[in-house]
Image (tube, rainbow, N blue to C red):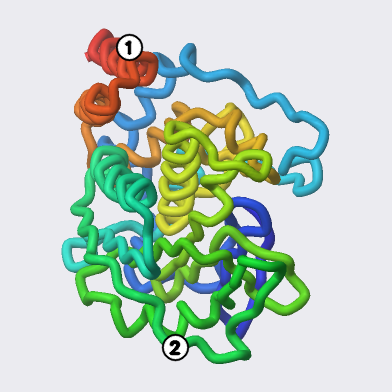
Amino acid sequence: MSNVYVKTASIWLLLSLLTACAPRNEPAANAAVSPSLDEHATEAARIREPLTRFFEPMIVQPGDWIESHPENGETFEEYVRSGPTLPTTERKTIYIQPIGKFTADQKQVIRLTADYMKAFYNLPVVLRDEIALGKVSDEQSRVQYPNNRQIRTSYFFDLLPKLLPTDAAALICFTNYDLYPEDTWNYVFGQASLENRIGVWSLWRLEKENGKPANKDLFLDRTLKVAMHETGHMFSMRHCTKFECLMSGTNHLGETDRRPLDTCPECTAKIVWGMNYDVGKRYKRLAGFWKKQGRTKEHDSMLQKARAIAAIK
């Protein structure tokens, strides 16, 4: 959802405000062969019409992502024909690795993010035990202002490949340290390499609101949106420009807070096709997640979508 930084033929997805995305020069090792629109794809495309009424068309406000970064978006059919990077039989597990020393609230948000990701993408998700931040060289850290030690993202990209399991579709690191990619940047929320199937995301700014701690629901929602959005990019999904969608680009936290906690019909079709996921089952699982959180509005919304899908079958 932000800028692209190209280095040694790899695409590094930089999050100048929240997330990042861009075209890739090279496919990841688990990239799929470009398929035709077969029966499975045709069936996935059918879900778009009954879901459309649940989503608002994108409305661009001053300062929004697409205002300064015009892009065309991507239809479901274009996604299928692009030969996207998808999970394979050998690489289908998402690993989440916390690195740092986390508060009880941060640990809970990470646990819930792992649960939501299972329901969202229909993939095995393994939440690893947290590990401490190791020794960081002076060249890979700085103090931006008092009480804010920032870690250069290169520290994590030196470390994460050593922790990457052979069956990983992606290894996602969460840290509670603020991040920066280069000396000329103030900060980033995270950075990822599609080629290497690794990424690091910071909680440090997501749990703040106007300099104060954000409420627990807002902190959770932001983390879920960032994690689901960035995982979508790991599976080659581009920004959505058609609807207000979880996969729409964001340029600031206010724009992120406007986005829904679900993908629009176009992007949902990509997920149910790419993950071989029954869309009705998906919405029931997401509804179950929100029921456990006591979030009635979100629970009811997911069930309404499940009913809309059931009506066409």
Q: Is residue 274 visible?
A: no
Q: Position of residue 228 (x, y in %)?
A: 41, 46
Position of 115 relative to 59 (above/below): below
At label 2, the amino acid type is Lys
* Quadrant of residue 130 within the rendered picture: bottom left
Whichever of labels 1 and 2 marks the residue nearer the N terminus, that label is 2
Q: Position of residue 90 (x, y in %)?
A: 18, 68
- Please, what secondary structure does the residue beneath circle 2 have? loop
* Quadrant of residue 221 within the rendered picture: top left
Position of 55 relative to 79 (above/below): above
- Please, what secondary structure does the residue beneath circle 1 have? helix
Residue toward you, 177 or 94: 177
Total marks shown come to: 2
Quadrant containing the C terminus in the rendered view: top left
Residue toward you, 94 or 299: 299
Q: Are marks 1 and 2 in contact (CB under 8 Å)?
A: no
**Residue at x 68%, y 60% (from the top left corner):** 3
Q: Which mark is residue 265?
A: none
Whole-number angstrom distance, CA of label 1 to CA of label 2: 50 Å
At label 1, the amino acid type is Gln
Residue at the farthest top position: 311
Q: Position of residue 140 (x, y in %)?
A: 58, 85
Please tell me how crowded label 1 is: few (under 14), some (14-19), or many (20+) other residues with Cα within 10 Å: some
**Residue at x 37%, y 46% (from the top left corner):** 105
Q: Which residue is mark 1?
A: 304
Q: Which residue is mark 2?
A: 135
**Residue at x 27%, y 63% (from the top left corner):** 95
Which of the two marks, 1 or 2, is nearer to us in this view? 2
Residue toward you, 24 or 197: 197
Position of 281 relative to 201 (above/below): above
Please tell me how crowded label 2 is: few (under 14), some (14-19), or many (20+) other residues with Cα within 10 Å: few
Q: Is residue 201 left or right of residue 132?
A: right
